[in-house]
């Protein structure tokens, strides 16, 4: 298991009502895979990093951290 850095960006994510909601977007610095979560707090960042591990397109079980 490797420690992989991710770039964290605050963004606007589309919501189910057709509008925009503040959110977080994480991008893997190794393969450029991205994940998103609503909210801009620490919990949203952690959610993106957990999703990164669950959704890894390379089926790796890395430990993802904020860059």
Image (tube, rainbow, N blue to C red):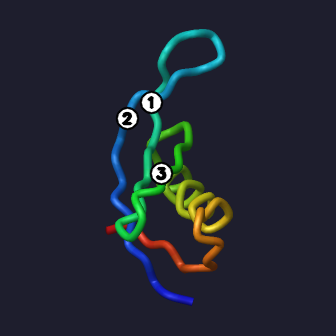
Quarter of image, res 28: bottom left
Regarding mark 1 in the picture, which secondary structure is present there? strand
Establish if 23 lies above or below 62: above
Residue lying farthest to the bottom in this orientation: 1
Q: At x 40% / y 58%, what residue is drawn?
A: 32
Q: Earlier in the sequence, mark 3 or mark 2?
A: 2
Q: Residues within 10 Å of mark 3 (few under 14, many from 20)?
A: some
User: Are discs 2 and 1 less than 8 Å apart at CB?
Assistant: yes
User: Are discs 3 and 1 less than 8 Å apart at CB?
Assistant: no
Regarding mark 3 in the picture, which secondary structure is present there? strand
Question: In the visual, does 2 lie left or right of 32?
Answer: right
**On the image, numbered disc 1 is attached to which residue?**
22
Quarter of image, res 60: bottom right
**On the image, numbered disc 2 is attached to which residue?**
11
Q: Earlier in the sequence, mark 3 or mark 1?
A: 1
Q: Position of residue 66 (x, y in %)?
A: 39, 67
Q: Residues within 10 Å of mark 2 (few under 14, many from 20)?
A: some
Q: Residue 56 versus residue 21: which sits nearer the camera? A: 56
Calculate the distance from the C-alpha at mark 3 to the C-alpha at mark 1: 16 Å
Q: Position of residue 14 (x, y in %)?
A: 52, 22
Q: At x 65% / y 17%, what residue is drawn?
A: 16
Q: Position of residue 38 (x, y in %)?
A: 55, 37
**On the image, numbered disc 3 is attached to which residue?**
34
Q: Which mark is residue 5?
A: none
Q: Position of residue 36 (x, y in %)?
A: 53, 44
Establish if 28 lies above or below 63: above
């Amino acid at each position: 298991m490797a420690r992989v850095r991710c770039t964290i960006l605050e963004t606007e994510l589309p919501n189910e009502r057709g509008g925009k909601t503040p959110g977080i977007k994480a991008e893997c610095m190794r393969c450029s895979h991205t994940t998103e979560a609503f909210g801009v707090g620490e919990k949203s960042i952690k959610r993106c990093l957990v999703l990164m591990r669950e959704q890894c397109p390379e089926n790796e079980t890395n430990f993802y951290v904020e860059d």
